[in-house]
Image (tube, rainbow, N blue to C red):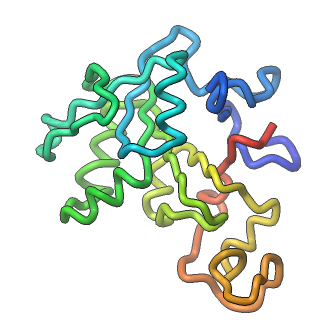
Amino acid sequence: MDPGTHSPPGWGVGCKGLLISLVRKDKIQKIVSENGLPIGLLAAPFHMLNVLVACGELPFRAVNLSALSLPPYRCPYGLPAIDSGDTVVVSYLWLREQCRRGIEVISQILTPLRQRFRRILGFDHSAPFFPALPNDYISEMDVVLKTGGIYRDLELYQFLVGTLTSDGNWSEKREPGPERFTSTNLRRCCTNNQS
């Protein structure tokens, strides 16, 4: 990893708008395969994902979940479906929706997806700097695109800071945070503003 960035080796984030154009192509490989393989997408409608899909430059496809004994996935973008592939993008809002339905996210979704896709990209589009995805979900992903930004000092994620505080504390490590994140998982998080 380059000093000062948090993008795992071989990954880039940023579409020829958001997901590809903001990466340093000399240092970070594109998230899409060089051969243009389709990218699976499991998402609830969200404005940033709307832009990614609408730009039409990434070969997104819905994911057929029928083999996983899950309720059918109704892709909000009307994309054709694939059963497996190289990369799947899974949005936080879609995972939260499944959890509310009583579905065990890791054993019923993420683990089976790992058997069908080589890479799992989490899309954490919550506004605060703090990850919305729990640590155990991140453990099942290769990279998490964190749209709200990333602290350079990853240790800050172990404390109540930023929008989680009522006093505007953005940098003091005073009170332990609501969840512990492993350093490995924090290094999986990156932002579309990193270059």
Q: Residue at x 54, y 41 (%)?
A: 48
Between 110 and 59, the one lying in front of the other is 59
- Asked whether residue 188 is in view, the answer is no
- Asked whether residue 135 is in view, the answer is yes
Image x and y of residue 148, in percent = 65, 56
Between 8 and 165, the one lying in front of the other is 165
Residue 1 figure quarter: top right
Q: Residue at x 40, y 54 (%)?
A: 93
Image x and y of residue 17, in percent = 66, 27
Give the quarter of the figure containing the C terminus: top right
Image x and y of residue 51, in percent = 53, 32
Q: Residue at x 28, y 34 (%)?
A: 75
**Image position of 193 (left or right of 72):** right
Between 27 and 169, the one lying in front of the other is 169
Question: How many numbered circles are shown?
Answer: 0
**Image position of 141 (left or right of 160):** left
49 is higher (above) or lower (below) than 110: above
